[in-house]
Amino acid sequence: MDTQEPARESDSSLLKAVEFLEKGAWQPAHEIVQGDNSNLAAWLHGIVHTLEGDLDNARYWHRRAGRDFPGAEGAQREIASARRRVTR
């Protein structure tokens, strides 16, 4: 018997956003995350703005997600962590 909840539509959209971030394609990822109000989307939104170079906005979105801002040098680690989060 499968005890996992069925995947929500936003989960699959956020997975797609992570895939874009892994490719460095922050613009299409931004289009996805700005339409989602979840903490995960806020975190991804922070990563988007980190890749974009808008670090003040990135700090805001990390705070909103309840996460520490790792700085621009932490973007790839954040993307890897986000990948693990959306695929569990």
Image (tube, rainbow, N blue to C red):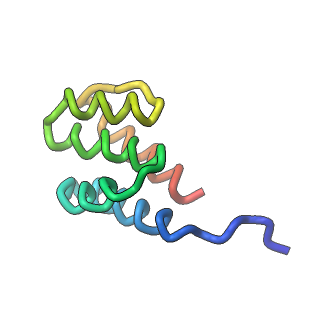
37 to the left or right of 49: right
Relative depth, front residue between 54 and 87: 54
Q: Quadrant of residue 20?
A: bottom left
Where residue 3 sits, quadrant-wise, is bottom right
Above or below 80: residue 71: above
**Residue at (22, 41) in percent of width and height:** 49
| Nearest the eye: 23 or 58 | 58
**Residue 23 percent location from the top left of the image:** 24, 58
Q: Residue furthest left?
A: 53
Left/right of residue 19 with respect to residue 12 in the rendered view = left
Q: Residue at x 27, y 58 (%)?
A: 29
x and y percentages locating residue 39 in the rendered image = 47, 43
Indicate the quadrant containing the C terminus: top left, top right, bottom left or bottom right: bottom right
Q: Is residue 7 above or below residue 42?
A: below
Judge whether 3 appears above or below 50 on screen: below
Q: Is residue 87 above or below residue 51?
A: below
Judge from the rendering whether residue 63 lies leftward or rightward of residue 49; answer left or right: right
Residue 80 appears at what percent x and percent y? 41, 46
Residue beneath the point at 41% across and 66% down:
13
Task: From the top left corner, tell me how far across and down residue 55 is, in percent.
Answer: 19, 30
User: Exactly how many numbered labels are in the figure?
Assistant: 0
From the viewer's perspective, tell me whether residue 84 is left or right of residue 63.
right
Farthest residue toward the right? Answer: 1
Q: Quadrant of the N terminus?
A: bottom right
Q: Residue at position x 20%, y 58% from top?
A: 25
Residue pushed farthest bottom?
1
